[in-house]
Image (tube, rainbow, N blue to C red):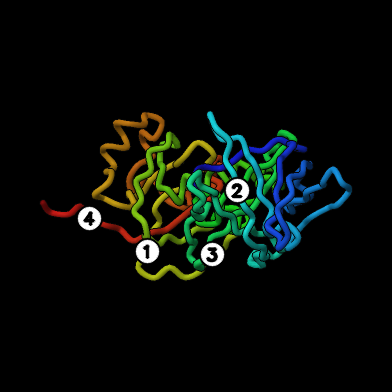
Amino acid sequence: MRGPFSIASGLMLACAFAWSRPASALEGQIRLEDTELVLRLDDGRVLRRDGLTGVKLILASGPRNLEIRIEGFEEDRTILRSPLPLYRMSVLQPNGGSTDLCHPDPSGRRAAFAFPDGKGGFNLTCTSGAEGKCVLFGYRPWESRGGVPMGDLLQACIHLLRADYGGDDRPSTRNGTVVNLYDRFGIQDPGAAAGMEFEAAWGREGAVCVAHPRIADNVTLEQLAERYPRLKGRLGPEACTEEAMRADPRALIFNQSVVTSPTLR
């Protein structure tokens, strides 16, 4: 994906319809109602779900506008509380071609969804990215549980998936690496994790402690200690245990992973 889009509520959009008759240019307002995109056109029509298929949206993206076409609609039902609307989208190119907005996720879907940004607008994100995966895990930032804003859980989950221990956008994971993720609120349960050991506890700002780095070739405990003084005394399997972190309210999410060794060079 080309980065998450933050869209103001009620944004005026120029729209065109890919119907059999010649496309007509219209204007309308697109809003997020719960987690569903709804387009209210100036001619009185209201489009949602499958009715949005073929609609082109002109979105502001940096110095130029980005033209996105909605190619299809489906629902994700892996979240128990309610299904999440998903949209297949493509980016239209100046030469007339198009490319998928999203990379395929683990299920093979190239889908995006919208969620409230907390400022009266909404964000678009892909199910293939860390943010999208974490929302599908159940960390919906527009909800709260146990007095902890779900936005904090979402940020902790994103740091976890990327192995961004310092929370400073320095990911150290490797594509395809499997982790066992769970949290103190029971949204995700530990489950079975044969061959895995406790890796780290995570909060909004990154790791709260690190027992072992996920990919030893990418970062070591010594490097983490040098980069992040706040982790001093919280690195290594003796200093970082799940039992101890369960007592630390900053630790929202935990994970296990396979212990790796540096590659001999």
Looking at the rendered image, the disc whose residue lies closer to the viewer, 2 or 1, is 2
Dot 1: what SS? loop
Q: Identify the secondary structure beneath mark 4.
A: loop
Label 2: which residue?
68
Query: Gap in Å between the C-alphas at discs 2 and 4?
Result: 44 Å
Q: Residue at x 29, y 42 (%)?
A: 221
Q: CA distance from mark 3 to mark 2?
A: 17 Å
Task: Give the crowd class for mark 2: few <14, some 14-19, many >=20 residues within 10 Å.
Answer: many
Outermost residue toward the front in this view: 22
Nearest the eye: 159 or 38: 38
Other residues around mark 3 within 10 Å, as few (<14) / some (14–19) / many (≥20): some
Rendering quarter of residue 175:
bottom left
Question: Which is nearer the N-term, disc 3 or disc 2?
Answer: 2
Along the horizontal axis of the image, is 162 left or right of 225? Answer: right
Q: Nearer the viewer, residue 261 or 8?
A: 8
Q: Earlier in the sequence, mark 1 or mark 3?
A: 3
Disc nearest the viewer among 3 and 2:
2
Which residue does the numbered mark 3 point to in the structure image? 109
**Residue of label 4:** 261
Q: Earlier in the sequence, mark 4 or mark 3?
A: 3
Q: Which residue is mark 1?
A: 196
What residue lies at 28% left-to-right and 43% top-to-bottom? 219
